[in-house]
């Protein structure tokens, strides 16, 4: 009844538009202008009459009014010129991007109403206060140019340069220069290939190197930011500082190197693509530590780290069988990624001293080394340098091995007359957590848990159990060891590889004569399935796409039970009349 007496309304108005114009000045010379505009307005009202609240707290009627506005526009003018010179083709392009995003929030609270009939307006409020006002404006400008040249469809050269400006940086660091160069050789067009390798329909080598910039941080971090007090003292408005300024913050720069090979065989019935990439990110936009005496423990800055991501990507597409009644096609891909921290000067004195290690992946996991369960007490045991058996956070954590991860997928599609069959398999080879109930959930709450918790120590002499003994008594040795160390150990770290039949489908399309006899235009029967089968080494391992509301992916805990993806099977008909 109380909720029913507190009306709430939200009205959204959304306007979107775009405009583009193109004009050919001369043959090969073109002018183009593209633009877009978006305006979203959300108006909310909420009324809380005193009659809807507990009278023992002497409630006062109040009303809340909020307006959220998002306004974005972008303008992109370009001029391009294309010229053919014998067997060569050249194209030039110059342009710019001018963009602005504005978000604004105004929230007002009205109290001391003379009548609840006036709660829909601020006019009848005896006291009006503003809370959580917000305004942010983001401006982005860029000018750029591009040069492309190709000769006889064999040799390709391209180069780009752009100068980007962002309002998220201070006046001295607002602009960044970024460029890229690339080239390709289509060697299948060479006479020595055409005359001697007739089975090769495509052969192409390509490479590129360039710099890109990143400004994806909140607005105004180079300034001191203030916010309005949520609960004003004695109804007096006040401000407090929410961040410390950094006028030296600047663009993050990524240096990207890539080589690729594309091959086609037997008139493109078999297509192979292989890529190698190396991305080095520097000037990272992250956080630097501050003494807490300043009122803040960190501030946004460019850290001097260099992170490298490398990898090899392979993709194959083949038309295995091409027949009038039967076709079979296959697509296969695999990626072998690698990540590590190349350098970080003065890492030991930084905000990330206990998080990163030079030469190791940036997503490394540090864990205590688990040595088994004491068969007499049921308590887990750990390796410690001091020999005390109680792990030390600073000295006893080890870097969990990641091995050589790789992932990929394969799809197959079959067609036989009016029948079609297709399925997709994906896999991930990795080291990681192999159980979704590793943390301190046993005996801690009333919740559904992974069935692996049944395999726990229960009495003296139990050996080779997966879990330590359970205890509902805080302070007990088993409880303490389990809560504080076991969940942060490598007890469940190992081969977390998996292979999954993600989806499959089977369909039959009825013939034209049969359909016409039934008075239909089309009739198709189909069966589809998703999340059909998961194979892994550990029977207790959760589906890799399992999520936990409010918690980390793939981990169950006492408060938020893990939610595995649904296995879904759909049977249907497609009809047209």
Image (spheres, rainbow, N blue to C red):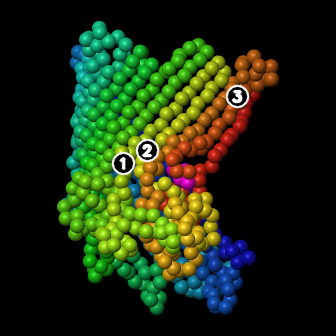
Q: Tell me if residue 408 comes above or below residue 477 in the rendering.
A: above
Which mark is first along the chain, 3 or 1?
Answer: 1
Residue 567 at x, y percent in the picture: 63, 46
Counting other residues with Cα less than 10 Å from the Cα at mark 3, is it few (<14), some (14-19), or many (20 or more)?
A: some
**Circle 3: element type:** strand
How many marks can you see? Answer: 3
Q: Tell me if residue 404 comes above or below residue 265 in the rendering.
A: below
Residue 326 at x, y percent in the picture: 59, 17
Q: Is residue 366 magenta?
A: no
Instruction: Identify the residue at image location x=54%, y=35%.
Output: 424
Which mark is first along the chain, 2 or 1?
Answer: 1
Tell me if I can see residue 72 in this picture. Answer: yes
Counting other residues with Cα less than 10 Å from the Cα at mark 1, is it few (<14), some (14-19), or many (20 or more)?
A: few
Residue 408 at x, y percent in the picture: 44, 39
Instruction: Identify the residue at image location x=51%, y=79%.
Output: 476
Q: Tell me if residue 59 comes above or below residue 267 in the rendering.
A: below
Tell me if I can see residue 282 in this picture. Answer: no
Label 1 vs label 3: CA separation?
47 Å
Q: Are marks 1 and 2 in contact (CB under 8 Å)?
A: yes
Label 1 vs label 2: CA separation?
9 Å
Q: Which mark is residue 429?
A: 2
**Which sits in the foreground, 101 or 327?**
327
Instruction: Kindly identify which residue carries mark 1.
Output: 403
Counting other residues with Cα less than 10 Å from the Cα at mark 2, is it few (<14), some (14-19), or many (20 or more)?
A: some
**Circle 1: element type:** loop
**Circle 2: element type:** strand
Mark 1 vs mark 3, foreground winner is 1
Instruction: Kindly identify which residue carries mark 3.
Output: 524
Q: Tell me if residue 13 comes above or below residue 133 in the rendering.
A: above
Q: Look at the magenta stretch and give its main secondary structure.
A: loop
Residue 361 at x, y percent in the picture: 31, 53
Q: Which residues are magenta?
A: 540-544
């Amino acid at each position: 009844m109380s909720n029913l007496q507190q009306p709430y309304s939200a009205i959204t108005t959304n306007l979107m538009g775009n405009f583009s114009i193109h004009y050919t000045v001369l043959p090969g010379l073109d002018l183009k202008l593209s633009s877009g505009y978006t305006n979203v307005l959300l108006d909310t009202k909420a009324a809380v009459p005193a009659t809807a609240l507990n009278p023992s707290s002497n409630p006062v009627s109040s009303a809340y009014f909020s307006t959220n506005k998002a306004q974005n526009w972008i303008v992109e003018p370009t001029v391009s010129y294309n010229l053919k010179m014998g067997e060569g083709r050249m194209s030039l392009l110059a342009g710019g991007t001018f963009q602005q995003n504005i978000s604004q929030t105004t929230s007002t609270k009205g109290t001391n109403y003379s009548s609840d009939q006036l709660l829909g307006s601020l006019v009848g409020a005896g006291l009006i206060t503003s809370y959580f006002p917000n305004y942010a404006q983001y401006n982005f400008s860029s000018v750029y140019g591009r040069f492309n040249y190709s000769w006889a469809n064999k040799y390709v050269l391209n180069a780009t340069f752009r100068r980007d400006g962002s309002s998220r940086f201070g006046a001295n660091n607002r602009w960044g220069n970024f460029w890229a160069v690339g080239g390709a050789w289509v060697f299948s067009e060479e006479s020595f290939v055409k005359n001697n390798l007739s089975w090769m329909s495509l052969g192409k080598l390509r490479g590129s190197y360039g710099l890109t910039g990143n400004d994806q941080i909140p607005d105004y971090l180079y300034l001191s930011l203030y916010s309005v007090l949520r609960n004003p003292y004695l109804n007096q408005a006040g401000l407090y500082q929410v961040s410390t300024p950094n006028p030296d913050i600047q663009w993050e720069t990524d240096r990207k190197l890539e080589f690729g090979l594309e091959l086609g065989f037997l008139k493109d019935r078999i297509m192979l693509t292989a890529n190698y990439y190396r991305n080095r990110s520097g000037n990272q936009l992250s956080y630097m530590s501050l003494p807490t005496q300043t009122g803040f423990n960190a501030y946004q800055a460019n850290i001097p780290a260099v992170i490298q991501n490398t990898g090899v990507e392979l993709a194959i597409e083949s038309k295995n069988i091409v027949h009038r009644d039967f076709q079979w096609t296959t697509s296969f891909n695999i990626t072998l990624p690698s990540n590590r921290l190349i350098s970080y000067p003065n890492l030991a004195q930084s905000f990330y001293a206990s998080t990163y290690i030079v030469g190791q992946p940036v997503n490394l996991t540090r864990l205590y080394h688990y040595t088994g369960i004491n068969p007499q007490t049921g308590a887990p045991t750990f390796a410690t340098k001091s020999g005390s058996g109680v792990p030390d956070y600073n000295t006893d954590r080890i870097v969990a091995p990641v091995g050589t991860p790789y992932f990929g997928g394969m799809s197959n599609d079959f067609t036989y007359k009016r029948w079609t069959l297709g399925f997709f398999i994906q896999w991930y080879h990795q080291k990681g957590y192999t159980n979704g109930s590793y943390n301190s959930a046993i005996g801690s709450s009333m919740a559904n848990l992974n069935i692996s918790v049944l395999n726990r120590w229960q009495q003296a002499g139990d050996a080779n159990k997966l879990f330590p003994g359970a205890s509902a008594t805080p302070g007990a040795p088993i409880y303490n060891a389990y809560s504080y160390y076991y969940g942060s150990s490598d007890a469940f770290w190992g081969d977390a590889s998996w292979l999954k039949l993600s989806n499959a489908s089977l369909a039959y399309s009825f013939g034209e004569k049969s359909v016409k006899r039934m008075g239909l235009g089309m009739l198709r029967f189909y069966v589809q399935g998703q999340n059909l089968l998961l194979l892994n080494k550990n029977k207790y391992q959760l589906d890799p796409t399992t999520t936990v509301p409010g918690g980390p992916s793939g981990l169950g805990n006492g408060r938020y039970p893990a939610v595995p993806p649904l296995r879904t099977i759909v049977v249907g008909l497609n009809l047209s009349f």
